Image: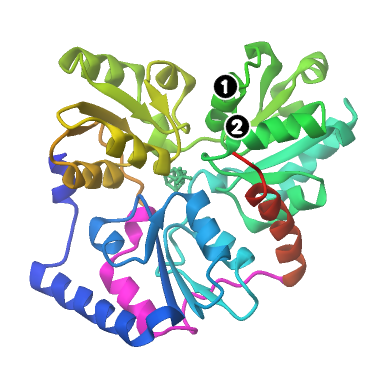
Amino acid sequence: MAEIFRQARPALSEEMALAEGIRALKLALGPELLILTHHYQRQEIVALGDYRGDSFGLSQRAAANPEARFIVFCGVHFMAESAAILAQPQQIVQIPDLKAGCRMADMVDLEQVEMAWTELTEIIDVETMVPIVYMNSDASLKAFCGRRGGLVCTSANARAAMAWGFGQGEKVFFFPDQHLGRNTGNRLKLWPEEMIVWNPEKPLGGNRPEDIRRARLILWDGHCHVHTRFQVEHVLKMKEAFPDAKLVVHPECTQEVVALADACGSTGFIANYVKEAPPGSTIIVGTEINLVSRLALEFPDREVLELHYSLCPNMFKIDLAKLLWTLENLGSVNVITIPEDLKAEARLALRRMLNLST
Ligand code: 13P
Ligand code: SF4
């Protein structure tokens, strides 16, 4: 945990002045301004937000606050983009750093998915395959799913989304996170041989035609480096040191790590799991370090421990100086814009997700 305090930060007085400036602008703007913060944001950013949450909760907030003229999204680009897709036409969505991306989202693009679809058309009837894209993706991929009768999911509703997909068709094409996809397939009791991985670098994704015909779930070969860093050996080491502890992890972890956990869910689920844990208990958490550190601070009467140190460098790009600069330039800097036709199709896929009952 000590490493988090070694992360570069401005001097305390400078930090206080920046926070003061942000608070003053918030006060002046009142309900015209909505600051959304993801659970992986730094503590000082979360403290200044109007709502904090997981990607699903924040997308709901973005869709449900039409009175806010300006939405400032403290998170990564795909989250701000989803908020912009769901927002009303008069609302403006900004992100304090346009370079706050997501390495997993960058593991797939529309051209690759169109190519995979074309290749699959040679082997199976793609009309019976439902595309499901993880929220961690570009708007063009959400639009692809909107066009093709699929939907978006987050880690909070992946199970409901996949069950919905299997209700609509025989196969599900899930991208880009193979681990969330596989963990969800496991929860739906799919057999390992019913799940194949699609590697976009190889012909037929590296699969034989008979494997594709047999598969029910096709998983894109993508992953989150923040969560695949957690290894079985970390779990074994922590369990040995803290035999009575509970382990909760995010579903972007590998299935081997998830199998050893007591619980698995979205960042919102993890925050709630720690909140509901009895005082005096020990909880080991396998997710991004800023959330783990904050939970440890918020619940001093229980021991909250990191499974292993893992920081999302993109989430960490948002800081007080960038947030203040964005608020000083509302409506003009780092505005998220999406072409209208793309927006309509992407909104369809996001709306299907919001209408799922989880
Ligand atoms: P949540 O949807 O659980 O907030 O997760 C988003 C994310 O990027 C996890 O790495
Ligand atoms: Fe992307 Fe992983 Fe960072 Fe989440 S933690 S934003 S999936 S890189």
At 42% from the left and 37% from the top, the residue drawn is 225
Q: Which residues are magenta?
A: 315-339
Q: Is residue 342 above or below residue 6?
A: below
Q: Are marks 1 and 2 in contact (CB under 8 Å)?
A: yes
**SS assignment at label 1:** helix
Local crowd at mark 1 within 10 Å, few (<14), some, or many (≥20)? few
Is residue 203 something that shows in the picture?
A: no
Which part of the image, by quadrant, shows the N terminus? top left
Identify residue for label 2.
159
Is residue 69 something that shows in the picture?
A: yes
Q: Amino acid at mark 2?
A: Arg
Give the number of the disc on residue 247: none
- Looking at marks 1 and 2 on the same chain, the residue that comes earlier in the sequence is marked by 2
Q: Position of residue 198 (x, y in %)?
A: 68, 29
Residue 338 within the magenta-colored segment of the rendering? yes
Q: Amino acid at mark 1?
A: Arg
Residue 209 within the magenta-colored segment of the rendering? no
Is 154 on the left or on the right of 24, as rendered? right
Q: Position of residue 106 (x, y in %)?
A: 55, 48
Near-viewer residue (352 or 214): 352
